Image (cartoon, rainbow, N blue to C red):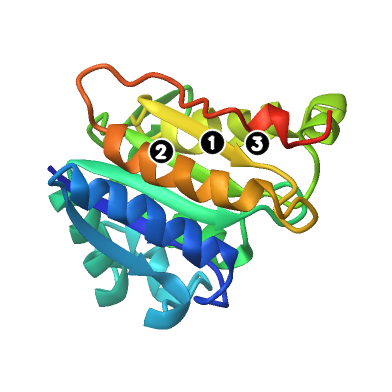
Amino acid sequence: MHVLVVFCHPRRDGFSGAVLDAFCSGLQSARHGVELADLYREGFDPRLQPEDYAQFEGRPMPADVLAEQARVERADALAFVFPVWWWSFPACLKGWLDRVLSSAWAYSFTPGLSRGLLPNKPTLLICVAGSRASTYAKYGYDLAMRTQIEIGILGYCGIRDVSTQFFYEVDDDAEARPLYLEQARHLGEQFLAPRRVPCDIGLDSVRPS
């Protein structure tokens, strides 16, 4: 199967990049095709443009938006790899979603009625996080992110087969990093398996509660 992986981080050589590489390696070992949308390296402009309002006027969208939409259309599945900043995704990825998930392509809306237009493709979010799992649980940050992204954005557009994987405390827990990379590779290998199950390789033993 063909997987579009959207990666968003200003540094390609950091830990988020290593997670991306491990995940893509797992996809390839499972014989899936990988198409990488590296938003920073490709110079995608996340700012909504005046020309983007064509979506509300029945006119063609700008060429860079159409190119990203074509990527989504030819993919059998989607994955997003990004760091968690301020309990959400980076602004560049938010801008990609703002521009690419356009009206009349990703969704339709009339007062009192909205409908997702995208096919329900398997989608995985890999969130590289600096804080502890206990902090996320205490304040409900993980649930808030899942509600915002899985339901409010992707689900609204018709994509409901979505799962989210957090890699917690990556800056302070050096022992967890190799295990996270192993888990990222396993996620790639099992992402489109007939029966997807949560991956657990003992991270609780090295992560503070």
Q: Which residue is mark 3?
A: 145
Question: Is 163 above or below relative to 5?
Answer: above
Q: Label 1, on which residue?
A: 165
Location of the N terminus by quadrant is: top left
Which residue is at 41% across, 29% downward?
162
- Judge from the rendering whether residue 20 lies leftward or rightward of residue 58; answer left or right: right
Which amino acid type is marked by label 1?
Gln
Q: Residue 41, located in which quarter of the rendered image?
A: bottom left
Q: Do the residues bearing badges 3 and 2 touch, measured as CB atoms within 8 Å?
A: no
Disc 2 marks which amino acid? Leu
**Is the Cβ of the residue at disc 1 closer than 8 Å to that at disc 2?**
yes
Tell me if I can see residue 156 in this picture. Answer: no
Q: On residue 98, which mark appears?
A: none
Disc assigned to residue 124 = 2
Q: Nearer the viewer, mark 3 or mark 2?
A: 2
Q: Residue at x 37, y 80 (%)?
A: 42
Which of the 4 image quadrants contains residue 134? top right
The percent coordinates of residue 81 (x first, y second) are 48, 54
SS for callout 1? strand
Residue at position x 60%, y 31% in the image: 146
Q: Is residue 100 left or right of residue 174?
A: left
- Cα distance, mark 3 to mark 2? 13 Å
Q: Earlier in the sequence, mark 3 or mark 2?
A: 2
